Amino acid sequence: MPTDAGQGTIAEAMHFADSHVHLADAAFAEDADAVIERARAAGARALVCIGESLEAAARARVIAARHPGLVFHTAGVHPHDAGSWDSARDADAVRAAVRAGAVAIGECGLDYHYDHSPRDVQRRTLDAQLQLAAECARPLVVHTREAEADTIDFLREASAAGIGGVLHCFTGSSALAEAGLEAGWCISFSGIITFRSWSDDEILRRVPDDRLLVESDAPYLAPVPNRGKRNESAWVPLTIARLARARGVSALQLAAMTLRNTQRFFALPPSGGA
Ligand SMILES: [Zn+2]
Ligand SMILES: [Zn+2]
């Protein structure tokens, strides 16, 4: 007779998604496949590999092709590099990425903390990617830091255009969260919510079940107790546990829910193991 496997007495394995990971970053140049394997072994069933530049997007596409059904890719231009955006050349590159299977446009956005590109250029480059999202019928992955008023304006614009998106690595105010939710967008939390400095559990509870995503943002922002190390998707369960605690649900439930949300938001095929 088989043992009690399948009779519900063995703890159910956690299956989760990482909605935002920079596997094409130079930090993973040597061992991206090993990092992906560790994530799979930890229960990851969907990894969204972010192309934050057109070069990174091309690498992301190659990585995703090596891990079909597990790793998916996006294409866009980060606000830090907004100054390099060339409409004629880059819009076509994004369209080509979408034809090749990119599941979202981004990450793009507004970052007035670093101001690596002039603010008006950041806004123009973001608008150009909004147009592409509309044209290609893909959601937007948006990075926003210290740019709340302009991001709220942008969310209204996106909502009017019927464009969905996610505010990734959310650390903003409740006003920004409300604007995102009103626009019908998702909100994604990273390992920052495990840091001792995080105090806004109210916002962790405020996001409705079906709008909630989790992410590593690796190689950055490793959750406690790995803070300061190179981050990786296998550690997303640490962030899931923290978010589950704030919301008063089990980590297993929260993992399953955010996996489903990731699959729905990016229109991914359902995972075999989930
Ligand atoms: Zn970002
Ligand atoms: Zn990112």
Image: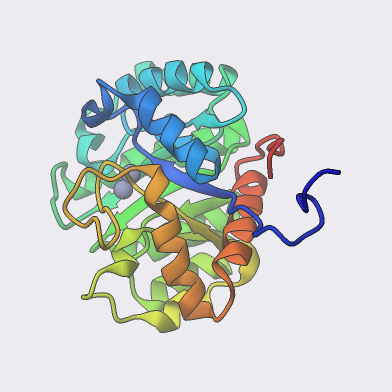
Q: Nearer the viewer, residue 155 or 208?
A: 208
Query: Residue 115: horizontal and vertical position, in percent?
Result: 14, 49
Residue 199, picture quadrant: bottom left
Q: Write the residue at 46% across / 79% down.
A: 246
16 left or right of 148 in image: right
Q: Looking at the image, is 185 positioned above or below residue 182?
A: above
Query: Residue 251: horizontal and vertical position, in percent?
Result: 54, 66
23 left or right of 4 in image: left
Query: Residue 249: horizontal and vertical position, in percent?
Result: 59, 76
175 left or right of 55 in image: right
Q: Write the residue at 43% across / 84% down.
A: 202
Residue 205 appears anywhere in the view: no
Query: Residue 27: horizontal and vertical position, in percent?
Result: 22, 31
Q: Please, which residue is most extreme toward the right here?
A: 1
Q: Write the residue at 65% across / 60% down.
A: 11
Of the 4 image quadrants, the one containing the C terminus is: top right
Of the 4 image quadrants, the one containing the N terminus is: top right
Give the colour scheme of this rendering. rainbow
Residue 94 appears anywhere in the view: yes
Q: Please, which residue is most extreme toward the front here?
A: 1
Q: Nearer the viewer, residue 248 or 98?
A: 248
Q: Write the residue at 59% across / 37% down.
A: 138
Q: How many marks?
A: 0
Q: Nearer the viewer, residue 261 or 255?
A: 255
Q: Looking at the image, is 11 positioned above or below residue 269?
A: below
